Image (spheres, grey):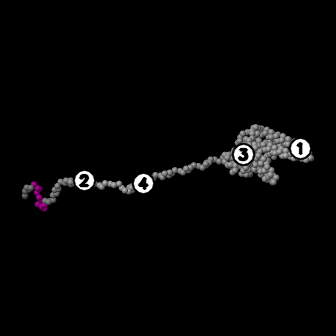
Amino acid sequence: MSENTGGQPPRDPGEPERTPDPWQPPTQPPTEPPTQPPTEPPTQPPTQPPTQPPTPQQPTYGQQPPGYGQEPPGYGQQPPGYGQQPPGYGQQPPAYGQPPAYGQAGHQGGYAGPPFRVGEAVSYGWHKVTSNLGPWLLVSLILLGVSALYNWLTGSFDRSFDVDDYTSSTDLAAAGGITVATVLLALLGSILSYVITAFLTRGALDETTGNRPRVGAFFRISNVLHVILAAFIVTILSSIGLILCILPGLAVYIFSTFVYYFTLDRGEDAITAIRSSWSLVARNFGSVFLLLLALIGVNILGAIPFGLGLFVTIPLSYVAVAFAYRRLIGQQPA
């Protein structure tokens, strides 16, 4: 048995001999940081101002351009008057019997107004006269007395100067003078009838305004000269029409229905009042004609009981015509 002097474990005789591993880890020298030359700031050439304006910077992807999404000036603002209703829109139409405001049309173009019913006008006249019967009766008696006195005076004058009593040439010349006087008396009688009609018309107009006229109110008329002149023109025209043919004369009377009302209520001159009445009747001929026919029938009935009913039916006729006048010019009778 051999001795082990090297301090290594004994080797097995059957084990093959091992050779020592010749590899050893390499011995590396310590690493040191490499030395670099000191850096110096790079020198750049001086900048010069550009000779062209800079181009606008394009927005980067995903960024909205300036002003994107903003409304243009005035966008969404309504034009002036947008959404406003037209004048009168949504207003209820006036109830029957309430005409539009007065003065919506002029004389030359006619007067705007709703048509009236004949029965409504007659009923209105009856109600107004019977509720204020005292003044109407007293005024009617006064005017009747004045007319009777005038007729008596003119009759006495004609009997005092009978043409048949004159036989000489001198007497015939005197008779000619009396004929002129008779014409003047007839003219005076016509003027008196015009004034009486104006008195009754004035009372009828007051009734339609809600003022119950007293006796003195009937005689407070203005524009007397044009009232008489307008009535005289109508009388001449209607007389000519009756002589030539009856129908033209009747037409003049019908178209002149509102002459007194325009001269007294509006203060119009004679020619303007005639034109206004003719224009108003022409636009409402059917209604006015039926009303006049109805009033003729009413006065015939009033004349049956010894003419006493005329003290009511004649004032009723004036008030009914005043009612039609108010309605046709666009006013509402009170």
Q: Of the residues shown, which amino acid type is indicated by label 2?
A: Thr
Task: Estimate the spatial distance between the alpha carbons at disc 2 and disc 3, rounded to whole Å.
Answer: 116 Å
Whether pointer 4 and pointer 3 mark residues with C-beta atoms closer than 8 Å, the reply is: no
Task: Estimate the spatial distance between the alpha carbons at disc 4 and disc 3, rounded to whole Å.
Answer: 76 Å
Given this view, does label 3 or label 1 mark the residue nearer the observer?
A: 1
Looking at marks 3 and 1 on the same chain, the residue that comes earlier in the sequence is marked by 1
Task: Tell me what residue is drawn at x 66 percent, y 48 percent.
Answer: 104
Task: Estimate the spatial distance between the alpha carbons at disc 1 and disc 2, rounded to whole Å.
Answer: 157 Å
Occupied quadrant, residue 149: top right
Given this view, does label 1 or label 4 mark the residue nearer the observer?
A: 1
Q: Of the residues shown, which amino acid type is indicated by label 4?
A: Pro
Task: Estimate the spatial distance between the alpha carbons at disc 4 and disc 2, rounded to whole Å.
Answer: 43 Å
Q: Secondary structure at mark 1?
A: loop
Main secondary-structure element of the magenta-colored stretch: loop
Number of on-image labels: 4
Name the residue that disc number 2 marks: 39
Q: Is residue 18 one of those drawn in magenta?
A: yes
Name the residue that disc number 3 marks: 268
Q: Is residue 48 visible?
A: yes
Q: Secondary structure at mark 2?
A: loop
Looking at marks 4 and 2 on the same chain, the residue that comes earlier in the sequence is marked by 2
Name the residue that disc number 1 marks: 161
Looking at marks 2 and 3 on the same chain, the residue that comes earlier in the sequence is marked by 2
Task: Tell me what residue is drawn at x 85 percent, y 42 percent.
Answer: 154
Q: Is residue 231 left or right of residue 73?
A: right
Where residue 321 appears, as percent x and y from the top left, is 75, 46
Name the residue that disc number 4 marks: 65
Q: Secondary structure at mark 4?
A: loop
Where residue 249 appears, as percent x and y from the top left, is 79, 51
Given this view, does label 1 or label 2 mark the residue nearer the observer?
A: 1
> Camera-side residue: 165 or 315?
165
